[in-house]
Amino acid sequence: MKRTAGKSASEVILVGDRDLAKVLSRALHVDTEVSRWTHGFHTWPAGLHPDAAQILVRAFPGDSLLDPFNGGGTVLVEGIAAGRRVHGRDISPVALRIAKARSCVAEEVLLTKFRSRSRKLVAAAQEASARPHDGIYGVVSSWYAPHVVHELESLRVGIESSDADIRPLLEVCFSSILVKVSWRKSDTSNRREKHHRPPGTAAILFHKKCRELARRITALREDVPEGTPSADVRSCDARKVTVPESVDLVLTSPPYPSTYDYLPMQHLRSVWLGDTRPDHLEIGARRDWRDGAGSARNGWLADTFHWQKACADALKSGGHLVVVIGDGLSPAGAIDTAKPTEDAAIAAGLKPKARASVAREDHGRGTQRWEHVLVYEKP
Ligand SMILES: C[S@@+](CC[C@H](N)C(=O)[O-])C[C@H]1O[C@@H](n2cnc3c(N)ncnc32)[C@H](O)[C@@H]1O
């Protein structure tokens, strides 16, 4: 379920296996704030609610799990907490970085080294005065106060020269503060809102996030059943997804059509972190609908078949595909997702088992949109 603040659930439709559909409906109705383990450490647009992920993971017991659109990694965290071998895939370098850090079971020795390095980086950043090279500066200078740019540049260079085993943890903490200390309103809005952050704020915030991440990973590791590995997280197009083993469960929330531009939205982070963004691989992107609703819809239908076919191939016989998806919203109106997703799953050789759909009032837009959980079995 997406976090849909300001929208209330009304009508519910249950289809297929009644008991299972009721469990799916329960997953669509969770709404309490959750901060256990690494949940909530880093923002990611349209993240699945952790309790919804937990309900769905528990409803389909087994040893292994794949999320081919892992985003911020919510499903991966719940998967390893349930003691499963977990595989996460996404095409967004930022998402992969967040998901990897959030679903690792790093040992205390590594976390101590990470905390100690972060202290050194913070001390250096508080004295910083160097500008980034033009490739970065040209983009970021209009989004930050000059002293913030100097602090961030010092952190960036310090992270780049850190040992490879702790660099991913330092990078995700750096990533987590980049929008907060900028003049960008939020991850999902590029409106400019100037504010004053006193010198040292970026460095202090970074240090706080490093301590927080270490604390959260420790809490996760302590609850993960002995012997469970960190999630295997890799860059991969969901339409061609591969995993090193056949899995019992594919649990995922693909992009809702015409809702977000996930990759361009991370522009500031990509620039600071030196990522190459494969924007052309993004499925369901909002910008596709701006270029023409007919071709965007046809492209999305074909993509929906291809990723579900790849997931069907990754499943064991008797395994389940669980899709959490909401209707899209294009300038021409709502885009139904349940029927096309179901048609594509059947064409991919899967058998429908149950569905729950919930209508949500979107008071902001004066409309109603549906969210669905659909379950298929591989014969
Ligand atoms: C709805 S979000 C997933 C949110 C995730 N369930 C969470 O809890 O954070 C959809 C994700 O699909 C990714 N994505 C878009 N096109 C993709 C593709 N072709 N292959 C893999 N991932 C893709 C986006 O980068 C985004 O992270």
Image (spheres, grey):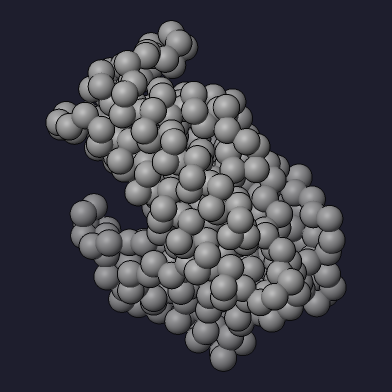
Rendered-image quadrant of the C terminus = bottom right
Q: Position of residue 284 (x, y in %)?
A: 53, 43
Q: Residue at x 58, y 60 (%)?
A: 108
Q: Residue furthest top?
A: 134
Q: Residue furthest bottom?
A: 19
Q: Can see residue 31?
A: yes
90 horizontally vs 309: left or right: left
As drawn, 174 above or below 3: above
Reply above or below: 34 against 21.
above
Residue plotted at (41% across, 53% down): 211
Q: Residue at x 67, y 58 (%)?
A: 231
Q: Could you tell me residue 271's position as x and y percent?
A: 47, 24
Indicate the quadrant containing the N terminus: top left, top right, bottom left or bottom right.
bottom left
Considering depth in this image, is 134 or 18 the residue closer to the camera? 134
Residue 351 seen anywhere in this rendered image of the structure:
no
The residue at the point 49 percent across, 24 percent down is 157
Percent across and percent down for residue 23 are: 52, 84
Residue 73, picture quadrant: bottom right
